[in-house]
Image (tube, helix red, strand yellow):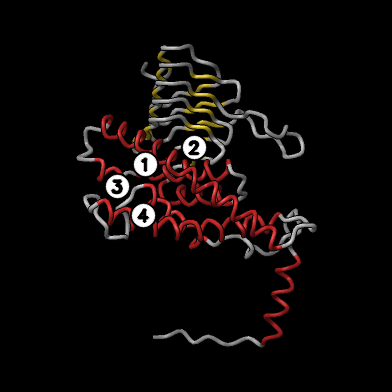
Amino acid sequence: MAIQRRTAPKQAYLRLADRILKTKTSDQSTQFGTLPSPADIAELVDDLLAALFPGWGRSGVAFGAPNAKLREHLASVLASLERRVEETVFLGLRRRCSKKETEAQCHALAQKQAARFLASLPHVRELLVADLEVAYKADPAATGTDEIISCYPGLFAIAVYRAAHSLLKVGAPIVPRMMTEHAHARTGIDIHPGAHIGSSFFIDHGTGIVVGETTIIGANVRIYQGVTLGALSVKSRNVEEPGKKRHPTIEDDVIIYANATILGGNTVICKGAVVGGNAWITYSVPAGVRVGAGM
């Protein structure tokens, strides 16, 4: 049986709207429509993955397709991607445009940033190929790299992070964070786009991982589900020094097992160290040392 609803007079809705709009955020903003929508970000990420892993996704063009066909398809994906990047970056820029900047100037800047970002994609692809290869070598359950690309949340989160980090480096505001939050919502893996992560990075399982903004991770590092690389304390916006390193440094060849927590900007896990599961680390660990529960 359908529920019958009464229609309130329009004036009642207008009064309710007035009451809602009276409550403002700290920057006096009450509307969020100026930023890209979640659907915009999801489509951007889809196009990015189709560009970084040609032949994968909704395109229907197989990995084994003739080079000419795959090349033509990839070129069309890149054209679509450039438009999406321009549009979403423009929305992020417009939010921060000063009164002296016109909308046309914001558009021009978005175009420049999109072009620089697309030029960085070959390097992003090289990093992801290394990530993919180490995932295949490290996980005996993987039947092929195509399975890892299609199924593994760790690679998805890393791919989105690497693209978002590259977009952040060309100066795009807001959108890189929205991209990694899209990956966070989908995988449970929270990597801030400002983190610096070296090559051959492997996330096994992945759910619950947190990598903070100022984290530095070296090459050939492996981390498991539930790992937190976080700040030792959280201070108010007025007290904290801008740009201060708050999150740990993880050097090359480190393994961090499930549910370990490593905190602090001065904390360094040195080359080849192993951090055991459920460990709580707020101090530096020398190279090659094993620490933590059960170690």
Using the image as rendered, state which of residue 144 and residue 208 is in the foreground. Answer: 144
Q: CA distance from mark 2 to mark 1?
A: 15 Å
Question: Where 158 falls versus 43 (above or below)?
Answer: above
Q: Quadrant of the N terminus?
A: bottom left
Residue position marked by numbered label 4 in the rendering: 74
Name the front one of labels 3 and 4.
4
Picture quarter containing residue 27? bottom right
- Pointer 4 with pointer 1, Cβ within 8 A: no
- Pointer 2 with pointer 1, Cβ within 8 A: no
Residue position marked by numbered label 1 in the rendering: 155
- The circle drawn on residue 210 is 2
Label 2: how many Cα within 10 Å (few below 14, some 14–19, many 20+) = many
Amino acid found under the numbered disc labelled 1: Leu
Q: CA distance from mark 4 to mark 2?
A: 33 Å
Residue position marked by numbered label 3 in the rendering: 151
Name the front one of labels 4 and 2.
4
- SS at mark 2 in the image: strand
Q: Decide which of tag 4 and tag 1 comes sooner along the chain.
A: 4
Tell me if 250 is positioned left or right of 111 in this view: left
Amino acid found under the numbered disc labelled 3: Cys
Q: Decide which of tag 3 and tag 4 comes sooner along the chain.
A: 4
Q: Decide which of tag 4 and tag 2 comes sooner along the chain.
A: 4
Q: Decide which of tag 3 and tag 2 comes sooner along the chain.
A: 3
Q: Is residue 135 visible?
A: yes
Name the front one of labels 3 and 2.
3
Relative image position of residue 191 (x, y in whole percent): 49, 40
Relative image position of residue 230 (x, y in whole percent): 55, 32
- Pointer 4 with pointer 2, Cβ within 8 A: no
